Amino acid sequence: MIMTTSEEENNIIILGCGIIGLSTAYYLSLSPTNTSPIILIDPTPDLFSSASGFAGGFLAKDWFSPSLAPLGALSFNEHTRLAAENNGREKWGYTPSTCISYIQHHDGSKQQRRGDDWLRSGTSRVNAAPVEAEQDERRRPVWLRKKEGDKVEVISEEGTTAQVDPRRLCEWLLEEVKNRGGVVMYPAKTTQVVRDEATGGIKGVKVKDSKDGSERVIKGNKIVITAGVWTPGVFKTLFSEARVEMKVGSLAGHSIVVRTPVWDATQGKRECHAVFTTHEKDFCPEMFSRLGGEGEIYFAGLNDSTLEVQNPEVGKAMPLEEQRELLREAVGDIIGGSDGDLEVVREGLCFRPVTEWGAPIVSRITEEDLGARAGDGGVWVAAGHGPWGIAMSLGTGVVMAEMVEEKETRVDVSGLGYHGSS
């Protein structure tokens, strides 16, 4: 629904109401020096219907390349702090977790891969020697099916990994922003930038209500684009004269959430795990046990960079049947409990925003690259976080809020530009 907005002329306009946009709005709403109303605009009829609602919610502190390390550490610390101060364990399932590489026995006919190979590829720091095998085995998740010849390795250090339910975190952030006067407009499409006739500077944006077709102008000279995989289209629509493109692509991912009586997070102080493994159908499953309800296990790893991105105005994307069946088969192979005991809670397809250089864009766009005057305001972009969108969300929100307020950023993100990571 489109909500009534302030007639103020100095609104901060955030295009995209996923976890990056909400994190930015949240920290702006906390800033004692920000007096501008915050307006988030999103074209989807169902908020959190892509990566922000269907991601795994795995958090890591120091598994990042050098250009990402400061932002990753800041974000992890913010996740920890917010959870401690706001009962995050109950409200969005925040909990420390143990990261496991599950190595299944094979017949030796082909070289065995590890489920955590992607973590060891240079984009992370999982190089610490595993502890003794017996200690590792004692950390095996109770819900992981045990097979002859398999083994587990603990690949995280204590206090460096955690877990959240991303949708519940988004819902909490949204309520916090609204409680401080922030406004969300959806489903609504931003169609053009409104400029000052005398100076050419940014004066606002024109917004079209997707339900009744009515249009209105939202005034404000600060525009933050946090539209995930749709960022390039939003940027091009608003700044067709720009000399640069926002090169953000898509990595589509299928997922399934199940319950099994073998895992019940409500019984005592059960430990949550992140498990990485391989499957004979040539993909690398990743599983995250969650708190809340009767305990859920998120199962994913089936990704596709060629799948066409869905129009966000349609709403939730529907999983492909072949991929659904493959995930269900893999769940039965790996997660303990008989087939009749496994309850499918939900299935999803989301589009993760990625860049060719493997690092997000967290940057202000220069007037030269915009190809037009920004005036007294400016344009900022935060997108392309790949599989680390939830993990880096809060840190990104911190630095984006600081950028918008023209403050020195808490950590160095100068290497996260739109021309490529440096």
Image (cartoon, grey):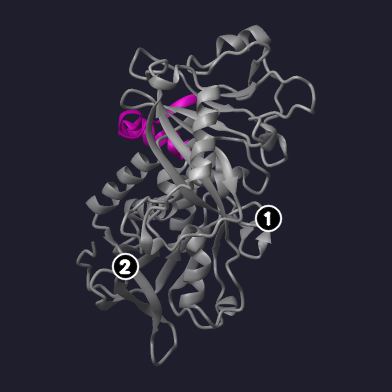
Q: Residues within 10 Å of mark 2 (few under 14, many from 20)?
A: many
Q: Which residue is mark 2?
A: 188
The residues tagged by marks 2 and 1 sit, at their Cα atoms, a distance apart of 31 Å
The three-letter amino acid code for the residue at tag 2 is Ala
Q: Which residue is mark 1?
A: 357
Name the chief secondary structure element in magenta. helix
Mark 1 or mark 2, which is nearer the start of the sequence? 2
> Is residue 87 inside the magenta stretch?
yes
Residue 320, percent from left and from top: 49, 48
The three-letter amino acid code for the residue at tag 1 is Trp
Q: Nearer the viewer, residue 400 or 312?
A: 312
Query: Would you place residue 155 above or below residue 308 in this image?
Result: above
Q: Which mark is residue 218?
A: none
Name the residue: 38% across, 87% down: 196
Quarter of the picture containing the C terminus is bottom right
Quarter of the picture containing the N terminus is bottom left
> Is residue 149 inside the magenta stretch?
no
Segment tinted magenta in the rendering: 77-97
Is 129 positioned to the left or the right of 152 in the image?
Answer: right
Query: Would you place residue 25 above or below residue 136 in this image?
Result: below
Residue 161 shows up from this direction: no
- Look at the numbered disc 2 and give the secondary structure of its residue: strand
Residue 368 falls in which quadrant of the image? Answer: bottom right
Is 272 positioned to the left or the right of 113 in the image?
Answer: left
Q: Nearer the viewer, residue 119 or 415?
A: 119
Q: Nearer the viewer, residue 16 or 324?
A: 324
From the image, state whether disc 2 or disc 1 is nearer to you. 2
